[in-house]
Amino acid sequence: MPRPQSFLAGCVFLFAIGGNASPSLAQDWSQFRGPNGNVADAKSSPVEIPQDSITWQTTIPGKGWSSPVVSEGLIWLTTAETTEATPEQIRKRTQGVQFAAIKTVAGSVKLRAICVDSESGKIVHNVVLKEITEPDLINPLNSYASPTPAISGQRVVCHFGNYGTWCLDSRSGDELWKRALEVDHSVGPGSSPIIVDNTVLIVCDGIDQQFVAGLNLETGERQWQTARPPMRATNVEYKKAYSTPLIIQIGGQQQAIIPTAQWVCAYDPSSGKEIWRADIGNGFSTTPMPVYESGFIICSTGYMSGELVAIDPKGSGDITDNISWRSRLSGPKMPTPVAKDGKLYSISDEGILSIIDIQSGEMIQRTRVGGKFASSPLVIANKLYLGNQAGEFSVFQIDGSGKASLIATNELDGAIMASPAVIGTNLIVRTSKSLMRVRP
């Protein structure tokens, strides 16, 4: 099997019928998963990418798993520069913390928003937003800059969990407003902001409180805040979640679908009013975004239970009875599945690829790919891309039945944790080392 040097990342290209109501320009990739649910309409897609296909490659300082977003020729992403904690700092900050043994802490953190010119790869803005002298503990797989920014017009929203949400002028880099929604994430931030019309959706599913808020895009003022449903868990660590909203249309009504621990809920993004909820079980740290395809919402139950659940979203109130099927063999904890032509492609954190018929819930194929996964699958045309934490980027051919066969494996420069953005036929790819533009 060929293993050429490659610099692509197979992350979260999720096929969705929904997506934001307002279409974006063809050259814009304005939020996590893109403007229309990560549909990449490329007529061709690479299998092997030689070094000379890299238009430019730019080193990004610090560490961050946020994905790049693109608008009007400018690429925005976030990062965090950290210093190593001293033994005394570690002792002090871990004292009395539940599960402290599986968390890490930095000595200090400097949060940054970075803007890169899409044509040249030159850093245009490198904005220090905040310096933190006593940062919270995080999961070793997480970063202090994991949520992906969102862009609408000339405004870019950068979110860092409880440390704050900033709105910047996308051209000048100037700060327009800042707000902080206090919540204890326990292991660091994860959910990305989504902009719907003039509202910025912020998900705050911490161990201390769980709610969703809508901020005014122009002013940052809180327009509404809605508490999550009550949960059965008595241990507060089992109440947290990190999913990002999916915006869809159901019967002409716009809905924000947002999983949390135990529940999946739909909200009116303009008012925050809950439309429906479904009890999906006792999972927690729910991270994957939901999928909407073939009339079903498909979501993961997160940690501990690890299932995929399909829900018919038509209705209101408690629609738990609308659960159509559950798959106990294929639920990812971090990667978001991708759906195309009625088939769901899900890679588990442990490297098991599951292909499921969405209407029936039937398992079509189950294959061990190998490696550890945090990023999510990408589908372009009839090819499936999977990138793991070791930097291996595998390409599969999808046949007419939906089954996938391996056709190439590439070695990437750096770990794959972020999702690429699309500009025409080019990809903007972030690895743990750099940001780069890749042409076919």
Image (cartoon, rainbow, N blue to C red):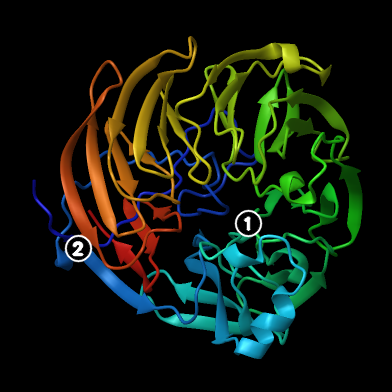
Asked if residue 53 is positioned above or below residue 229 in the image, the reply reads: below
- Residue 56 sits in quarter: bottom left
Residue 25 in view (yes/no)? yes
- Residue 245 sits in quarter: top right
Taking the image as shown, residue 46 lies to the left or right of residue 83, namely left
Q: Residue at x 50, y 74 (%)?
A: 63
Q: Residue at x 69, y 27 (%)?
A: 281
**On residue 53, which mark appears?**
2
Task: Give the camera-side residue of 220 and 308.
Answer: 308
Asked if residue 326 is positioned above or below residue 420 in the image, the reply reads: above
Q: Amino acid at mark 1?
A: Gly
Q: Secondary structure at mark 1?
A: loop
**On residue 123, which mark appears?**
none
Q: Amino acid at mark 2?
A: Ser
Taking the image as shown, residue 315 lies to the left or right of residue 369, namely right
Task: Give the camera-side residue of 29 and 164.
Answer: 164
Residue 21 in view (yes/no)? no
Q: Position of residue 350 (x, y in %)?
A: 39, 44
Q: Residue at x 31, y 74 (%)?
A: 57
What residue is shown with label 1?
190
Q: Residue at x 58, y 53 (%)?
A: 31
Q: Secondary structure at mark 2?
A: helix
Label 1: how many Cα within 10 Å (few below 14, some 14–19, many 20+): many
Q: Position of residue 337 (x, y in %)?
A: 47, 35
Sequence-wise, the earlier of marks 2 and 1 is 2
Q: Position of residue 252 (x, y in %)?
A: 73, 21
* Disc 2 from disc 1: Cα separation: 32 Å
* Total residue callouts: 2
